[in-house]
Amino acid sequence: MACRKCGGRLVQRSDDNKGVVLERLSVYLRQTKPLVEYYSTRPTFRSVDGTQAPDQVAADLDAAIEAARS
């Protein structure tokens, strides 16, 4: 299979399968989501969109830290 963008060969990782994804989602629901829900009620909680460009994520993190310090 080839990449639609560059034509390079695509390789599937051994851990890239339905079972692994379902387990990761299960772990998130059991362990991570309750923590996010708990801390999101705290006044110092901030959320940063990690899908942005790295420079923007860094800027948003800096802003969130400064806001939490104030």
Image: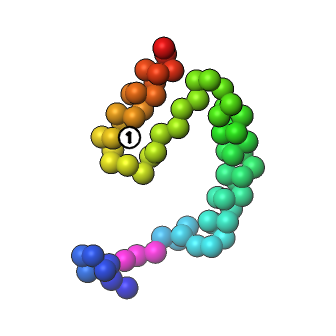
Q: Is residue 43 magenta?
A: no
- Report the side of 18 relative to 69 (left or right): right
**Picture residue at 27% right of the left edge, 76% below the top:** 5
Q: Which residue is mark 1?
A: 57
The answer, for residue 8, to whether it is visible in the render is: no
The quarter holding residue 35 reads: top right
Q: How many marks?
A: 1
Residue 48: x percent and y percent?
47, 39
| SS category of the residue bearing label 1 | helix
- Report the side of 68 relative to 29 (left or right): left
Residue 22: x percent and y percent?
67, 66
- The N terminus lies in quadrant: bottom left
- Residue 6 lies, with reference to residue 33, above or below; the image says below
The local crowd at label 1, few if under 14, some if 14 to 19, many if 20 or more residues have their Cα within 10 Å, is some
**Picture residue at 66% right of the left edge, 39% below the top:** 36
Q: In the displayed image of the protein, which residue is found farthest to the bottom? A: 1
Q: What secondary structure do most residues of the magenta stretch adopt?
A: loop
- Residue 49 lies, with reference to residue 18, above or below; the image says above
The answer, for residue 7, to whether it is visible in the render is: yes
**Picture residue at 58% right of the left edge, 24% below the top:** 44
Question: Amino acid under label 1?
Answer: Val
- Residue 22 lies, with reference to residue 40, above or below; the image says below
Magenta-drawn segment: 8-12
- Report the side of 11 relative to 3 (left or right): right
Which of 3 and 10 lies nearest the eye of the viewer? 3
Which of 22 and 50 lies nearest the eye of the viewer? 50
Q: In the displayed image of the protein, which residue is found farthest to the top? A: 70
